[in-house]
Image (spheres, rainbow, N blue to C red):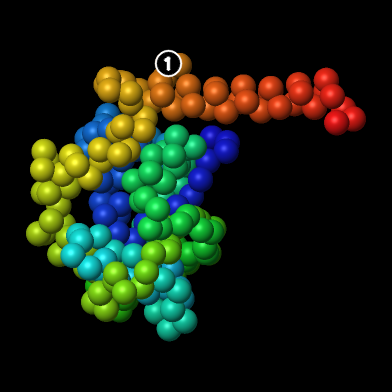
Amino acid sequence: MTDTHNAFFYGTLMAPEVLYRVCFGTVNPPASRHAHLKTYPAILHHFRRQRVAGCDYPAILPHPESTVRGTYVTGLTKADMYRLDIFEGWSYRRKPVKVKILTTTGDASGKGNVEGEEAEAETYVWTDEVRLLDDAEWDFRQFRREKMNFWIGAEGEAEYAEVDGAVREGTIDPTGGRGLDGSISRELEKHSMREEDTKAEVNENPHD
């Protein structure tokens, strides 16, 4: 598959159910919908993960002596990234990083981790005020144990409202916006038409 993205996730998106809900509109899509995604455990060096105060999710900031364990996901499409950007919101910015794929995964403290090859990825780095972050580390296992039900059930639908609203115009699109009449496809078509119009104006007025 060409023109795809690789991403490093370190928070709620480490849970396949949350990732699928964002990208495909359901926590349990058929395998054919997510077959293009491959997931590997990975480590991001020189960043620190902190809990966002009063929230179920974390953020990361550069830190020379810290590491963050998460998931490295390959094969993400433009449409997937479109949804993920909206889901993450304006407090985060997608930035390029280099991660190490784990050939052996150790315990929660990192003891027993064995690092393999380096890979390029994109990840979402906190750009809002630092005072909004707690000093405490965010615990994925605790999230799955205590908070997951608020993200994959009816109570969690509000977390995805902005994503759903951006890619579905009030109706259920079985392709998740990827069909010929899907909202994502329409937005891409509009963008392409604007580029073509711009090129045409330049050709018609080459000396302006």
- Foreground of the two, 135 or 21: 135
The C terminus, quarter of image: top right
- Image position of 162 (left or right of 96): left
- Foreground of the two, 131 or 179: 131
- Image position of 112 (left or right of 182): left
Res. 157 image quadrant: top left
**Residue under the point 47% across and 55% down:** 94
Residue 158: x, y in percent?
19, 42
**View extreme (bottom): residue:** 65
What kind of element bears circle 1? loop
**View extreme (front): residue:** 208
The residue pinned by badge 1 equals 181
**Residue under the point 26% across and 66% down:** 52
Q: Is residue 58 above or below residue 178?
A: below
**Residue under the point 37% across and 30% down:** 167
- Image position of 58 (left or right of 208): left
Residue 68: x, y in percent?
37, 70
The kind of residue on which mark 1 rests is: Asp
The answer to whether residue 17 is visible is: no
**View extreme (right): residue:** 207
**Residue under the point 47% across and 66% down:** 100
Q: Is residue 154 above or below residue 73?
A: above
Q: Is residue 53 above or below residue 89?
A: below
How many numbered discs sit on the rendered protein? Answer: 1
Q: Is residue 185 above or below residue 74?
A: above
Residue 186: x, y in percent?
48, 22
The answer to whether residue 131 is visible is: yes
